[in-house]
Image (cartoon, rainbow, N blue to C red):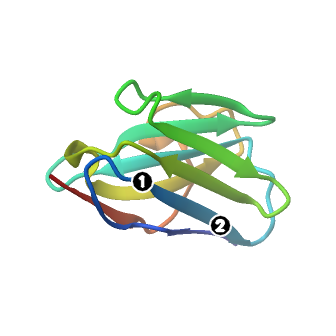
Amino acid sequence: QVQLVESGGGLVQAGGSLRLSCAASGRTLNFTTMAWFRQAPGKEREFVARMRYPGITYYAGSVKGRFTISRDNAKNTVVLQMNSLKPDDTAVYYCAADNTRAGLNVIDYAYWGQGTQVTVSS
């Protein structure tokens, strides 16, 4: 059984930084794709960043140049470094993973964490 657990969320002022981590537990899997999504209240869950083995990344236009996704395969962990945060970045951030070359849609991913809250104040 696979579990994904996010950590690192919190409250930060605009322009600040946060580092989110997602760790897999249970059965160890070398996921083909790991990603981050986010969901603000009343809105649909949206794609943020993706990494495919062995290190191909892709970012939503709204975060490109500010966020960086990285992966530690030995620890089966994916990290989202968020810099220059804006109030519009406020959301619950979710880690997602799949054994396929998953894309930009929620339905592409089989495994999900419970989310971690990120709040960016003005």
- Residue that badge 2 annotates: 23
Q: Residue at x 33, y 46 (%)?
A: 85
Element under disc 1: loop
Compare marks 2 and 1 and give the one earlier in the sequence.
1
Q: Residues within 10 Å of mark 1 (few under 14, many from 20)?
A: some
Image coords of residue 59 (percent x, y): 50, 29
Which residue occupies 57% across, 62% down? 21
From the viewer's perspective, is residue 13 above or below residue 98? below
Tag on residue 118?
none
Circle 2 residues within 10 Å: few <14, some 14–19, many ≥20: some
Residue sitting at the far right: 74
Work out how far the residue at label 2 is from the one at label 1, CA to CA, in angstroms.
20 Å
Residue farthest toward the top in the current orientation of the protein: 61
Q: Residue at x 48, y 32 (%)?
A: 104
Q: Residue furthest bottom?
A: 26
Q: Is residue 75 left or right of residue 25?
A: right
Amino acid carrying label 2: it is: Ala
> x and y percent of residue 44 in the render?
25, 44
- The residue closer to the viewer here, 8 or 113, is 8
Count all numbered tags in the image, as a single digit. Answer: 2
Q: Nearer the viewer, residue 15 or 81?
A: 15
Q: Amino acid at mark 1?
A: Ser
Task: State yes or no: discs 2 and 1 in contact (Cβ < 8 Å).
Answer: no
Task: Label 2: state its secondary structure.
Answer: strand
- Which residue is tagged 1? 17
Which dot, 2 or 1, sits closer to the camera? 1
**Residue 80: % across, % down:** 54, 50
